[in-house]
Image: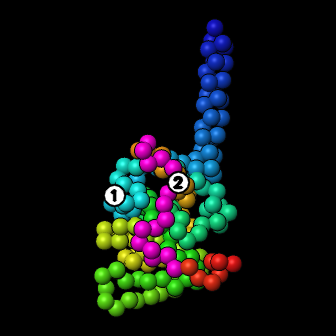
Amino acid sequence: MFRRVLGKTLGFVGYTIQYGCIAHCAFEYIGEFVVCSGPSMEPTIINHDVVFSERMSRHLCKIQKGDIVIAKSPYDPNMNICKRVIGLEGDKVCTSSPSDLFKTHTYVPKGHVWLEGDNLRNSTDSRSYGPIPYALIRGRVCLKLWPPHSFGTLSESPTKRIIKTQSDSD
C-alpha cells in the first residue's frame, strides 16, 4: 500500500516538474500574454488591454523601428514597460516634446534603443531616461487579444515620430 502511494506521488511530482519546465520554456522563448496598464500607449493600447508578446524577435535581434516592445523599466527592474521603438543604435532621434519651439536631437548609442509611448504628453519614456539597453527588451508585441472588438495586429505610430533613414529602405 505504502509503495503504491509513494509511486503515484512520485509520478505526479515528475509530471508536474516536466510540465513546469515546458511552461517555463514556452514563456521564456516563445511568448507571453501581457495585461498593459497606464495611458502612455493610447490610442494604440488602452489601459487593461491584453496583448501577446513574442520573444523570438528579441533573441534573433529582429526588433525594428515602429515595433511595440515589452521591456524592463530602467527605473524599476520589477516593472515592465510597453513602448514603441523610435530609434535603433546609430539613429538620430528627436529628444524634445512636440510642443517645444526648439528641437533637440541625439544619437542612439551602440547596443541601445530609443523607446517612446504613443501618448507623448502622458508617457515616461526615453525622453526622460534616455536610450535603454537592448538587453532590457523582453519581447515584441504582435497581437492585441482583448478587448475582442480590437483583436488583431497593432497599428502604426500615431505620432509620426519614426524617421526612416536611407538604410531602412535597403
Question: Residue 149, located in which quarter of the rendered image?
Answer: top left
Residue at image x 44%, y 83%? 94
Image quarter hosting the C terminus: bottom right
Q: Is residue 92 above or below residue 55?
A: below
Residue at image x 65%, y 35%? 18
Q: Are marks 2 and 1 in contact (CB under 8 Å)?
A: no
Q: Residue furthest front?
A: 149
Toward the viewer: 5 or 48? 48
Q: Residues within 10 Å of mark 1 (few under 14, many from 20)?
A: some
Which stretch did the figure color magenta?
A: 148-163
Point out residue 55 in the picture as x, y percentages from the top left corner.
60, 55
Calculate the distance from the C-alpha at mark 2 to the C-alpha at mark 1: 20 Å
Numbered circles on residues, count: 2
Q: Residues within 10 Å of mark 2 (few under 14, many from 20)?
A: few
Q: Which mark is residue 80?
A: none
Of the two numbered discs 2 and 1 in the rendering, the one whose residue sits closer to the viewer: 2
**Element class at badge 2:** loop
Point out residue 31 in the picture as x, y percentages from the top left corner.
58, 50
Q: How is the protein colored in the picture?
A: rainbow
Residue 159 located within the stretch drawn in magenta: yes
Toward the viewer: 87 or 8? 87
Residue on which disc 2 sits: 153
Q: Main secondary structure of the magenta part?
A: loop
In the picture provided, is 143 more to the left or to the right than 118?
right
Residue at image x 41%, y 83%? 95
Point out residue 136 in the picture as x, y percentages from the top left corner.
52, 65
Residue on which disc 1 sits: 38
The amino acid type found where label 1 is placed reads Gly
The amino acid type found where label 2 is placed reads Thr
Point out residue 59 in the picture as x, y percentages from the top left corner.
65, 61
